[in-house]
Image (spheres, rainbow, N blue to C red):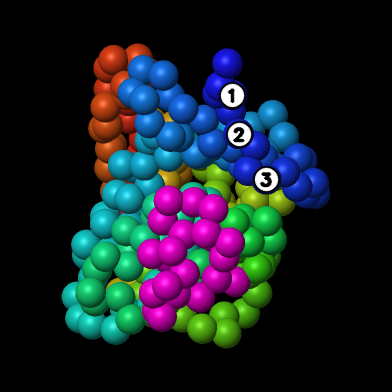
Amino acid sequence: MALRFEELDWQETPMGDLFLRRRVEPTLGVDVYEVKLGDEYLMSSLFTEAEEQLAHLGLAPLDGADLAVLVGGLGLGYTAVAALAHDAVGSLVVVDALPAVIDWHRRGLLPVSAQLTGDPRTSLVLDDFFALMRREPEARYDAILLDVDHSPRHSLDPSHADLYTPDGLRRLARHLRDGGVFALWSDDPPDETFLADLATVFPTADAHVVEFANPLTGGTSTNTVYVAR
């Protein structure tokens, strides 16, 4: 009998064991790449619409060319590659705290790895995004796109929680250029309290519900993308 799962990599991290695996989804007959951290399932290549929309919705309000974009969270790479699809993007810095994730893409283990690492606009940086936002800015960006935690209320590590407060959002805003955009992926429905916190820092803040087909349930699933400018 053929193996249904193939473990492509396993690493110990401060937040738990990190797994990258590939499996065949029997209902579709396609390869699916999945990432698990400890007991948390982080991401799947079966569902990428909302991750891609994080880039498209986050960049949509911006005009001009040679945009500088910062992505927090590399993951499977779909947000970063969606950002690179915008010709106006002049540079893309992707920050991830896990060396293994960056290594996966440099080794070409994932479907979009070659597209991501082969684009001269891309820089992959090993750093803690949340610690970076607490520091004084060394660079400023037209857009900051964040996809690390499950939602503002469900973070992977307790050290992330302060970013989703008004003080944390003000620290993040220092890293944006005038008129810049902060966009955030969330697995939860729109959170009115978080929207109110965004509105204390940014003149405009909206929550976009992204719907996508779920072949496992035969129905429709949703994620949320917050966009603040």
Q: Which quadrant, please, contains the N terminus? A: top right
Give the labeled residue for mark 1: 3
Marks 2,1: beta carbons within 8 A: yes
The quadrant in which residue 225 appears is top left
Question: Amino acid type of disc 3?
Answer: Asp
Q: Secondary structure at mark 3?
A: strand
Image spot of residue 96 (x, y percent) = 60, 61
- In percent of the image, x 54 and y 53: which residue is there? 109
Q: Residues within 10 Å of mark 2 (few under 14, many from 20)?
A: few
Q: Quadrant of the C terminus?
A: bottom left
Q: Is residue 121 magenta?
A: yes
Q: CA distance from mark 3 to mark 2?
A: 9 Å
Residue visible at 43% across and 24% down? 25
Q: Residue 9 shows which numbered tag?
A: 3
Q: Any mark on residue 6, and which?
A: 2
**Is 174 located above or below residue 59 in the figure?**
below
